[in-house]
Image (cartoon, rainbow, N blue to C red):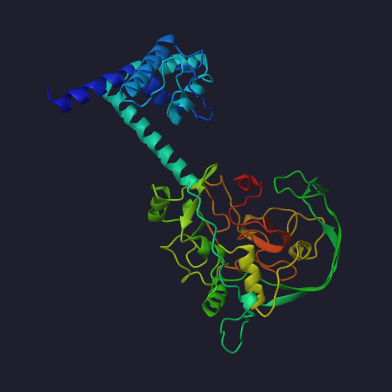
């Protein structure tokens, strides 16, 4: 038996010795979700749950102590006996699974132990390889989440430069505007259930309604389109904040396999920790909504996305001095003159009347409205003021808020009637 074969055989023996410390814990990881973390004891012992079988703890402790001795022989730990430094913690995934063992019902523990002991060696090998792959993936994702991109450099400001749209040069017409006659209305939650006004306890965080008054104002009948925003950028050389950052968030079900692979790779920015369906995609912007391999050539009449509040203000100034509506103006316009009604058309939810998520977000979308993602700006019937898509499709910026937190209204294609996706 040569040196390489001896090393392989030794690794196999170590793997068998780690029956529970690694392999059984791998099986547990596949059966139970894991959240809690435990640490190694300061005296060099492992803080396993007291309910874990003693023989399993023994194996784990022996291997752990052996690891410490090997490190000391190699000079990895120069501390004198009696003043030992706190040992390195177990790999994160083993910590999580070991802690989760404490929660496993006794009957399930026996079932898992029996099932594991019945596995042949090659199946144990597969479990071990699976465990190591998951550990490497978890570490890679942790690295990605820590690789926050730098703040964007300040780009040019058409507003500061006084750049305005020239109707003789610019051929793409601006969005038609309509005059909204001002008045008094109730600003805030007006959800109606069984003909009764419901208190504001939903996930949208709406405040109790209160009487508000708005003056006459002009409102675009639909959102700014890709085609309109493209002309703005082409003639001013404006770079959006997403372009300056070099990335933006994209829903994974809308991205290509190549983009997903890039995001999840070692150099990718990864995903939102508690909402893995949201990916930080390099080069995603208004011109490349789903990543660098996408463009807007076939969706020019769709609403522009990846646009910040600052970007929207810059566009408005260029578009002949238009402005964002105030929050009260926006809500007044969205209601279309109706009072004490849940929706612009009445109190009944009509999925085909707006572009929202119909199903278990983000897993399934029943496509009741006909769209998995965005829809053209004039897809659904307008409200009584002639305004399109005031509910769903894309969130809309309004005036107000602070630099660290601006105000959005209207919901988007990922939001649902029960507000579930709002928490994600």
Position above or below: 247 against 362: below
Position above or below: 52 against 380: above
* x then y, percent, for residue 173: 60, 81
User: Which image quarter is the N terminus in?
Assistant: top left
> At 37% across and 20% down in the image, what residue appears?
68
* Residue 175 in sight here: no
Position above or below: 30 against 314: above
> At 40% across and 14% down in the image, what residue appears?
56
Count of numbered labels shown in the rendering: 0
Of residues 194 and 254, the one nearer the viewer is 254
**127 relative position to 49: left or right:** left
Q: Quadrant location of residue 355? A: bottom right
Q: Quadrant location of residue 137? A: top left
**Residue that sits furthest to the left in the current view:** 1
* x then y, percent, for residue 378: 61, 69
* x then y, percent, for residue 170: 57, 84
* x then y, percent, for residue 323: 71, 72
Position above or below: 99 against 178: above
Of residues 92 and 250, the one nearer the viewer is 92
**232 relative position to 211: left or right:** left
User: Which image quarter is the C terminus in?
Assistant: top right
**Residue that sits furthest to the top in the current view:** 54
* Residue 14 in sight here: yes
């Amino acid at each position: 038996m040569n040196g390489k074969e001896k090393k392989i055989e030794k690794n196999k023996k170590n793997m068998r010795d780690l029956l529970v410390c690694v392999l059984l814990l791998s099986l547990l990881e596949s059966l139970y979700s894991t959240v809690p973390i435990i640490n190694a004891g300061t005296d060099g012992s492992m803080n396993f749950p007291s309910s874990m079988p003693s023989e399993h703890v023994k194996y784990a402790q022996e291997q752990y102590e052996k690891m410490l001795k090997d490190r000391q022989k190699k000079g990895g730990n120069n501390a004198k006996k009696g003043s030992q430094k706190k040992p390195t913690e177990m790999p994160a995934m083993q910590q999580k699974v070991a802690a989760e063992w404490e929660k496993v019902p006794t009957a399930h523990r026996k079932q898992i132990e029996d099932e594991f002991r019945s596995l042949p060696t090659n199946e144990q090998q597969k479990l071990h390889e699976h465990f190591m792959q998951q550990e490497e993936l978890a570490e890679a994702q942790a690295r990605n989440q820590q690789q926050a991109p730098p703040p964007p450099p300040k780009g040019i400001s058409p507003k500061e430069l006084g750049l305005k749209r020239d109707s003789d040069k610019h051929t793409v017409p601006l969005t038609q505007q309509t005059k909204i006659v001002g008045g008094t209305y109730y600003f805030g939650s007006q959800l109606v259930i069984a003909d009764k006004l419901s208190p504001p306890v939903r996930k949208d965080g709406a405040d109790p309604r209160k009487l508000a008054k708005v003056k006459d104002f002009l409102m675009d009948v639909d959102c700014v389109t890709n085609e309109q925003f493209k002309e703005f950028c082409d003639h001013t050389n404006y770079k959006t904040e997403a372009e300056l950052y070099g990335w933006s968030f994209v829903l994974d079900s809308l991205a290509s396999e190549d983009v997903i692979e890039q995001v999840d790779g070692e150099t990718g920015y990864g995903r939102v920790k508690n909402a893995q369906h949201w990916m930080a995609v390099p080069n995603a912007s208004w011109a490349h909504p789903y990543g660098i391999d996408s463009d807007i050539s076939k969706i020019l009449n769709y609403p522009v996305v990846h646009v910040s509040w600052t970007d929207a203000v810059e566009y408005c100034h260029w578009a002949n001095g238009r402005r964002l509506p105030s929050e009260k103006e926006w809500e007044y316009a969205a209601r279309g003159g109706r009072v004490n009604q849940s929706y612009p058309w009445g109190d009944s939810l009509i999925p085909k009347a707006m572009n929202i998520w119909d199903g278990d977000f983000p897993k399934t979308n029943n496509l009741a409205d006909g769209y998995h993602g965005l829809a053209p700006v004039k897809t659904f019937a307008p409200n009584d003021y002639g305004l399109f898509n005031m509910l769903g499709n894309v969130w809309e910026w309004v005036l107000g808020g602070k630099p660290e937190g601006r105000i959005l209204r209207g919901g988007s294609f990922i939001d649902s009637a029960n507000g579930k996706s709002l928490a994600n």
